[in-house]
Amino acid sequence: MENILLLYTRYSGYVDASFQKYANTFNARIHVVRYPVDGASPFQLTGNNQISLYNRSEYDYNKILELIKEHNIKVVLCAGWRDKEYLKVCRYVLREGGLTIGLVDNQWMGTLKQKVMAKTSFFFVKRFFKKLWVPGTYQFEYARRLGYARFDIMLNYYTANTELFKTTHRTSMPKKFIYVGRLLEIKGVHVLLAALKLVAADLQKAGWKFVVIGNGPHATEFEALANQYESIEYIPFLQQKELAERTMDGGVFVLPSNYDAWSVAVHEYACIGCPLLLSEAVGSRVQFLRQGFNGDIFVTGSPEDLVKKMKGFMEKSSGQLAEMGNRSSLLAGTINLDIWAYTLKNAINEFFAGTIYKPLKRTHYQ
Protein backbone atom coordinates (compact mmCIF):
# COMPACT_ATOMS: atom_id res chain seq x y z
CA MET A 1 0.00 0.00 0.00
CA GLU A 2 1.25 3.47 -0.93
CA ASN A 3 1.79 5.84 2.02
CA ILE A 4 1.69 9.62 1.62
CA LEU A 5 2.45 12.30 4.21
CA LEU A 6 0.55 15.59 4.28
CA LEU A 7 1.98 18.45 6.37
CA TYR A 8 -0.82 20.95 6.90
CA THR A 9 -1.93 23.97 8.85
CA ARG A 10 -5.71 24.51 8.38
CA TYR A 11 -6.91 21.07 7.27
CA SER A 12 -10.47 21.38 5.96
CA GLY A 13 -13.36 19.17 4.93
CA TYR A 14 -12.88 19.69 1.21
CA VAL A 15 -9.15 18.90 1.43
CA ASP A 16 -9.99 15.76 3.40
CA ALA A 17 -12.48 14.73 0.69
CA SER A 18 -9.80 15.12 -1.98
CA PHE A 19 -7.30 12.88 -0.22
CA GLN A 20 -10.05 10.41 0.67
CA LYS A 21 -10.83 10.14 -3.03
CA TYR A 22 -7.17 9.50 -3.81
CA ALA A 23 -6.92 6.86 -1.07
CA ASN A 24 -10.05 5.07 -2.30
CA THR A 25 -9.05 5.19 -5.96
CA PHE A 26 -5.44 4.05 -5.58
CA ASN A 27 -5.51 1.99 -2.37
CA ALA A 28 -3.33 4.46 -0.50
CA ARG A 29 -2.97 5.54 3.11
CA ILE A 30 -2.69 9.24 3.91
CA HIS A 31 -0.94 10.48 7.06
CA VAL A 32 -1.93 14.06 7.98
CA VAL A 33 -0.01 16.18 10.48
CA ARG A 34 -2.21 19.23 11.13
CA TYR A 35 -2.62 22.29 13.30
CA PRO A 36 -5.65 22.73 15.63
CA VAL A 37 -9.05 23.24 14.00
CA ASP A 38 -9.92 26.86 13.14
CA GLY A 39 -12.74 28.09 15.39
CA ALA A 40 -14.37 29.90 12.46
CA SER A 41 -14.39 26.67 10.42
CA PRO A 42 -14.68 23.80 12.93
CA PHE A 43 -14.67 20.87 10.52
CA GLN A 44 -15.32 17.59 12.33
CA LEU A 45 -12.68 15.26 10.93
CA THR A 46 -11.81 12.08 12.79
CA GLY A 47 -9.85 10.06 10.25
CA ASN A 48 -10.48 6.44 9.21
CA ASN A 49 -8.60 3.36 8.02
CA GLN A 50 -7.17 5.27 5.06
CA ILE A 51 -6.57 8.72 6.57
CA SER A 52 -4.67 9.02 9.86
CA LEU A 53 -4.69 12.39 11.64
CA TYR A 54 -1.85 13.56 13.91
CA ASN A 55 -1.73 16.74 16.00
CA ARG A 56 1.16 19.03 15.11
CA SER A 57 1.65 19.85 18.81
CA GLU A 58 2.51 16.18 19.43
CA TYR A 59 4.73 15.69 16.37
CA ASP A 60 8.04 17.52 16.18
CA TYR A 61 10.67 17.01 13.48
CA ASN A 62 12.07 13.79 14.95
CA LYS A 63 8.67 12.23 15.52
CA ILE A 64 7.60 13.06 11.95
CA LEU A 65 10.79 11.37 10.70
CA GLU A 66 9.88 8.29 12.74
CA LEU A 67 6.49 8.29 11.02
CA ILE A 68 8.18 8.51 7.61
CA LYS A 69 10.54 5.63 8.34
CA GLU A 70 7.86 3.46 9.95
CA HIS A 71 5.60 3.67 6.90
CA ASN A 72 8.31 3.98 4.23
CA ILE A 73 6.85 7.28 3.03
CA LYS A 74 8.31 8.56 -0.25
CA VAL A 75 5.80 11.32 -1.07
CA VAL A 76 5.24 14.45 1.03
CA LEU A 77 2.87 17.35 0.36
CA CYS A 78 3.34 20.50 2.43
CA ALA A 79 0.98 23.45 2.96
CA GLY A 80 2.71 25.02 5.96
CA TRP A 81 5.69 26.91 4.53
CA ARG A 82 6.11 29.03 7.65
CA ASP A 83 6.70 25.94 9.75
CA LYS A 84 10.48 25.47 9.72
CA GLU A 85 10.23 21.87 10.90
CA TYR A 86 7.83 21.06 8.05
CA LEU A 87 10.40 22.48 5.63
CA LYS A 88 13.16 20.53 7.33
CA VAL A 89 11.16 17.32 6.81
CA CYS A 90 10.71 18.14 3.12
CA ARG A 91 14.44 18.77 2.74
CA TYR A 92 15.17 15.37 4.30
CA VAL A 93 12.73 13.51 2.02
CA LEU A 94 14.05 15.30 -1.07
CA ARG A 95 17.62 14.34 -0.20
CA GLU A 96 16.52 10.73 0.27
CA GLY A 97 15.17 10.65 -3.29
CA GLY A 98 11.51 11.18 -2.45
CA LEU A 99 8.96 13.50 -4.03
CA THR A 100 8.04 16.70 -2.20
CA ILE A 101 5.20 18.89 -3.43
CA GLY A 102 4.68 22.42 -2.14
CA LEU A 103 1.06 23.58 -1.99
CA VAL A 104 0.66 27.23 -2.99
CA ASP A 105 -2.50 29.34 -3.00
CA ASN A 106 -0.91 32.80 -2.74
CA GLN A 107 -1.50 34.99 -5.77
CA TRP A 108 1.37 36.85 -7.42
CA MET A 109 0.89 40.44 -6.17
CA GLY A 110 4.35 41.81 -6.98
CA THR A 111 5.10 42.72 -3.35
CA LEU A 112 8.66 43.29 -2.19
CA LYS A 113 8.57 40.04 -0.20
CA GLN A 114 7.44 38.07 -3.26
CA LYS A 115 10.09 39.68 -5.46
CA VAL A 116 12.77 38.72 -2.92
CA MET A 117 11.37 35.16 -2.82
CA ALA A 118 11.52 35.00 -6.62
CA LYS A 119 15.15 36.16 -6.69
CA THR A 120 16.22 33.77 -3.93
CA SER A 121 13.85 30.86 -4.62
CA PHE A 122 16.59 28.24 -4.40
CA PHE A 123 17.17 29.04 -0.73
CA PHE A 124 13.52 29.51 0.26
CA VAL A 125 11.58 27.15 -2.01
CA LYS A 126 13.41 24.94 -4.50
CA ARG A 127 15.64 23.25 -1.94
CA PHE A 128 12.48 21.94 -0.25
CA PHE A 129 10.05 21.16 -3.08
CA LYS A 130 10.49 19.26 -6.33
CA LYS A 131 7.08 20.40 -7.60
CA LEU A 132 4.46 23.00 -6.75
CA TRP A 133 0.70 22.42 -6.83
CA VAL A 134 -1.45 25.52 -7.35
CA PRO A 135 -5.21 26.11 -7.68
CA GLY A 136 -5.26 28.47 -10.64
CA THR A 137 -3.85 31.07 -13.02
CA TYR A 138 -2.81 33.71 -10.48
CA GLN A 139 -0.88 31.13 -8.45
CA PHE A 140 0.67 29.60 -11.57
CA GLU A 141 2.19 33.01 -12.31
CA TYR A 142 3.78 33.04 -8.85
CA ALA A 143 5.12 29.50 -9.25
CA ARG A 144 6.74 30.40 -12.58
CA ARG A 145 8.40 33.44 -11.01
CA LEU A 146 9.77 31.16 -8.30
CA GLY A 147 11.70 29.41 -11.04
CA TYR A 148 9.62 26.26 -11.57
CA ALA A 149 9.29 24.87 -15.07
CA ARG A 150 5.77 24.42 -16.46
CA PHE A 151 5.98 20.64 -16.13
CA ASP A 152 6.87 20.96 -12.43
CA ILE A 153 3.74 22.98 -11.67
CA MET A 154 0.53 21.03 -11.09
CA LEU A 155 -2.83 22.76 -11.55
CA ASN A 156 -6.26 22.62 -9.86
CA TYR A 157 -5.12 21.88 -6.31
CA TYR A 158 -8.43 22.92 -4.77
CA THR A 159 -11.66 21.16 -5.64
CA ALA A 160 -15.11 21.09 -4.12
CA ASN A 161 -16.34 17.79 -2.76
CA THR A 162 -18.16 17.00 -6.00
CA GLU A 163 -19.75 13.91 -4.44
CA LEU A 164 -21.68 16.21 -2.07
CA PHE A 165 -22.06 19.34 -4.19
CA LYS A 166 -23.46 17.60 -7.25
CA THR A 167 -24.20 19.16 -10.61
CA THR A 168 -27.90 19.90 -10.92
CA HIS A 169 -29.80 20.95 -14.05
CA ARG A 170 -32.24 23.68 -13.08
CA THR A 171 -35.45 24.90 -14.66
CA SER A 172 -36.21 27.42 -11.90
CA MET A 173 -34.33 29.26 -9.14
CA PRO A 174 -35.52 30.37 -5.69
CA LYS A 175 -35.48 34.08 -4.87
CA LYS A 176 -32.52 33.77 -2.57
CA PHE A 177 -28.96 35.03 -2.09
CA ILE A 178 -26.46 32.85 -0.19
CA TYR A 179 -23.20 33.69 1.58
CA VAL A 180 -21.14 30.81 2.99
CA GLY A 181 -17.82 31.47 4.69
CA ARG A 182 -15.95 32.65 7.74
CA LEU A 183 -17.30 35.91 9.16
CA LEU A 184 -13.99 37.76 9.02
CA GLU A 185 -12.90 41.16 7.69
CA ILE A 186 -10.82 39.54 4.94
CA LYS A 187 -14.04 37.96 3.63
CA GLY A 188 -15.59 41.42 3.26
CA VAL A 189 -18.27 40.87 5.89
CA HIS A 190 -18.32 44.58 6.78
CA VAL A 191 -19.23 45.25 3.14
CA LEU A 192 -21.93 42.58 3.31
CA LEU A 193 -23.34 43.99 6.56
CA ALA A 194 -23.54 47.48 5.09
CA ALA A 195 -25.12 46.17 1.88
CA LEU A 196 -27.75 44.17 3.75
CA LYS A 197 -28.78 47.22 5.75
CA LEU A 198 -29.24 49.11 2.47
CA VAL A 199 -31.16 46.39 0.64
CA ALA A 200 -33.11 44.55 3.37
CA ALA A 201 -36.36 46.45 2.76
CA ASP A 202 -36.11 45.90 -1.01
CA LEU A 203 -35.54 42.18 -0.45
CA GLN A 204 -38.67 42.06 1.67
CA LYS A 205 -40.81 43.87 -0.91
CA ALA A 206 -39.60 41.68 -3.78
CA GLY A 207 -40.03 38.43 -1.85
CA TRP A 208 -36.30 37.69 -1.82
CA LYS A 209 -34.20 36.33 1.03
CA PHE A 210 -30.52 36.56 1.97
CA VAL A 211 -29.06 33.58 3.87
CA VAL A 212 -25.73 33.96 5.71
CA ILE A 213 -23.98 30.77 6.86
CA GLY A 214 -20.78 30.76 8.91
CA ASN A 215 -18.94 31.43 12.17
CA GLY A 216 -16.66 34.27 13.18
CA PRO A 217 -16.28 37.49 15.17
CA HIS A 218 -19.15 39.20 13.32
CA ALA A 219 -21.73 36.45 13.91
CA THR A 220 -23.69 38.51 16.47
CA GLU A 221 -24.10 41.35 13.97
CA PHE A 222 -25.66 39.03 11.41
CA GLU A 223 -27.86 37.51 14.11
CA ALA A 224 -29.09 40.99 14.99
CA LEU A 225 -29.91 41.75 11.34
CA ALA A 226 -31.76 38.45 11.03
CA ASN A 227 -33.83 39.32 14.10
CA GLN A 228 -34.59 42.75 12.63
CA TYR A 229 -35.51 41.70 9.07
CA GLU A 230 -37.54 38.68 7.92
CA SER A 231 -35.69 38.81 4.60
CA ILE A 232 -32.36 37.94 6.28
CA GLU A 233 -31.52 34.55 7.81
CA TYR A 234 -28.39 33.66 9.78
CA ILE A 235 -27.21 30.06 10.24
CA PRO A 236 -24.02 29.12 12.17
CA PHE A 237 -21.29 27.00 10.56
CA LEU A 238 -22.50 23.72 9.05
CA GLN A 239 -20.49 20.59 8.34
CA GLN A 240 -20.08 19.91 4.63
CA LYS A 241 -22.79 17.25 4.28
CA GLU A 242 -25.41 19.31 6.08
CA LEU A 243 -24.34 22.45 4.21
CA ALA A 244 -24.84 20.75 0.85
CA GLU A 245 -28.24 19.42 1.91
CA ARG A 246 -29.45 22.77 3.30
CA THR A 247 -28.45 24.79 0.22
CA MET A 248 -29.00 22.30 -2.62
CA ASP A 249 -32.13 24.16 -3.76
CA GLY A 250 -29.84 26.92 -5.02
CA GLY A 251 -29.89 30.70 -5.12
CA VAL A 252 -27.42 33.41 -6.12
CA PHE A 253 -24.09 32.79 -4.39
CA VAL A 254 -22.47 35.99 -3.07
CA LEU A 255 -18.84 36.38 -1.98
CA PRO A 256 -17.69 39.95 -1.08
CA SER A 257 -14.07 39.13 -0.12
CA ASN A 258 -11.50 41.89 0.29
CA TYR A 259 -8.96 39.22 -0.64
CA ASP A 260 -9.54 35.57 -1.40
CA ALA A 261 -6.60 33.63 -2.79
CA TRP A 262 -9.05 31.14 -4.30
CA SER A 263 -12.32 30.17 -2.48
CA VAL A 264 -13.53 26.60 -2.84
CA ALA A 265 -17.03 27.79 -1.90
CA VAL A 266 -17.33 29.39 -5.35
CA HIS A 267 -16.68 25.98 -6.93
CA GLU A 268 -19.17 24.31 -4.58
CA TYR A 269 -22.00 26.65 -5.52
CA ALA A 270 -21.11 26.68 -9.20
CA CYS A 271 -21.34 22.86 -9.05
CA ILE A 272 -24.91 22.88 -7.74
CA GLY A 273 -25.97 25.41 -10.34
CA CYS A 274 -25.97 28.82 -8.66
CA PRO A 275 -25.44 32.14 -10.44
CA LEU A 276 -22.39 33.88 -8.94
CA LEU A 277 -21.93 37.42 -7.60
CA LEU A 278 -18.29 37.91 -6.61
CA SER A 279 -15.99 40.77 -5.70
CA GLU A 280 -13.03 41.47 -7.98
CA ALA A 281 -10.72 40.09 -5.26
CA VAL A 282 -11.93 36.46 -5.44
CA GLY A 283 -9.21 34.35 -7.07
CA SER A 284 -11.42 31.53 -8.34
CA ARG A 285 -13.62 33.87 -10.39
CA VAL A 286 -11.13 33.53 -13.25
CA GLN A 287 -12.05 29.82 -13.40
CA PHE A 288 -15.75 29.78 -12.60
CA LEU A 289 -17.27 33.17 -13.53
CA ARG A 290 -17.92 34.81 -16.88
CA GLN A 291 -19.59 38.17 -16.41
CA GLY A 292 -23.09 38.19 -17.91
CA PHE A 293 -22.88 34.46 -18.71
CA ASN A 294 -23.30 32.94 -15.27
CA GLY A 295 -23.04 35.88 -12.90
CA ASP A 296 -21.55 39.28 -12.18
CA ILE A 297 -18.64 41.05 -10.49
CA PHE A 298 -18.80 44.03 -8.15
CA VAL A 299 -16.22 46.54 -6.97
CA THR A 300 -14.26 45.23 -3.97
CA GLY A 301 -15.12 47.11 -0.79
CA SER A 302 -18.21 48.83 -2.20
CA PRO A 303 -21.54 47.99 -0.51
CA GLU A 304 -23.28 50.35 -2.95
CA ASP A 305 -22.03 48.44 -6.00
CA LEU A 306 -22.89 45.13 -4.32
CA VAL A 307 -26.47 46.35 -3.77
CA LYS A 308 -26.68 47.57 -7.37
CA LYS A 309 -25.60 44.17 -8.71
CA MET A 310 -27.95 42.35 -6.30
CA LYS A 311 -30.87 44.38 -7.62
CA GLY A 312 -29.85 43.37 -11.13
CA PHE A 313 -30.32 39.72 -10.19
CA MET A 314 -33.64 40.51 -8.48
CA GLU A 315 -34.96 41.90 -11.78
CA LYS A 316 -34.30 38.62 -13.61
CA SER A 317 -36.91 35.89 -14.02
CA SER A 318 -36.60 32.50 -12.34
CA GLY A 319 -35.90 30.97 -15.74
CA GLN A 320 -33.11 33.44 -16.52
CA LEU A 321 -31.48 32.75 -13.16
CA ALA A 322 -31.79 29.00 -13.72
CA GLU A 323 -30.05 29.32 -17.09
CA MET A 324 -27.19 31.24 -15.46
CA GLY A 325 -26.98 28.54 -12.80
CA ASN A 326 -26.73 25.81 -15.43
CA ARG A 327 -23.88 27.72 -17.04
CA SER A 328 -22.13 27.80 -13.64
CA SER A 329 -22.40 24.00 -13.52
CA LEU A 330 -20.83 23.84 -16.97
CA LEU A 331 -17.81 25.88 -15.84
CA ALA A 332 -17.57 23.95 -12.56
CA GLY A 333 -17.22 20.64 -14.40
CA THR A 334 -13.62 21.41 -15.38
CA ILE A 335 -12.49 20.28 -11.89
CA ASN A 336 -13.73 17.36 -9.77
CA LEU A 337 -12.47 14.78 -7.27
CA ASP A 338 -11.54 12.23 -9.95
CA ILE A 339 -9.48 14.74 -11.93
CA TRP A 340 -7.81 15.85 -8.69
CA ALA A 341 -6.84 12.29 -7.73
CA TYR A 342 -5.38 11.51 -11.15
CA THR A 343 -3.44 14.78 -11.19
CA LEU A 344 -1.62 13.69 -8.04
CA LYS A 345 -1.17 10.10 -9.22
CA ASN A 346 0.28 11.16 -12.57
CA ALA A 347 2.80 13.45 -10.86
CA ILE A 348 3.89 10.63 -8.53
CA ASN A 349 4.18 8.08 -11.34
CA GLU A 350 6.17 10.42 -13.57
CA PHE A 351 8.60 11.29 -10.79
CA PHE A 352 9.40 7.72 -9.79
CA ALA A 353 9.54 6.59 -13.44
CA GLY A 354 12.30 9.14 -13.93
CA THR A 355 10.38 11.04 -16.60
CA ILE A 356 12.32 14.14 -17.67
CA TYR A 357 10.74 16.83 -19.82
CA LYS A 358 12.87 19.06 -21.99
CA PRO A 359 12.44 22.80 -21.41
CA LEU A 360 10.30 24.48 -24.06
CA LYS A 361 12.36 26.32 -26.65
CA ARG A 362 11.49 28.41 -29.66
CA THR A 363 11.38 26.43 -32.91
CA HIS A 364 11.06 27.28 -36.59
CA TYR A 365 7.33 26.50 -36.32
CA GLN A 366 6.80 29.58 -34.14
Image: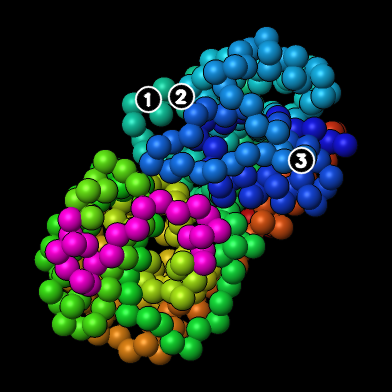
In this view, the residue in front, 349 or 267, is 267
Task: Answer with mark 3 or mark 1, whichever residue precedes in sequence.
Answer: 3
SS under mark 1? helix
In this view, the residue in front, 33 or 156, is 33
The residue at the far front in this view is 227
Which label belongs to residue 113?
1
Q: Position of residue 317 (x, y in %)?
A: 33, 89
Which label belongs to residue 117?
2
* Residue type marked 1: Lys
Is residue 265 highlighted in magenta?
no
Nearer mark to the viewer, of 3 and 1: 3
Report the residue at 77% width, 40% height from top. Answer: 49
Image side of residue 273 versus residue 20, left or right: left
Looking at the rendering, in which quadrant would you find the N terminus?
A: top right
The residue at the far top in this view is 62
In this view, the residue in front, 35 or 347, is 35
Magenta-colored span: 224-245
Q: Position of residue 171 (x, y in %)?
A: 48, 88
Residue 358 makes an appearance in the image: no
Q: Which residue is mark 3?
A: 50
Asked whether disc 3 touches disc 1, contact meaning CB atoms under 8 Å apart, the reply is: no
Which label belongs to residue 130?
none
Looking at the rendering, in which quadrant would you find the C terminus?
A: bottom right
How many numbered circles does the render carry? Answer: 3
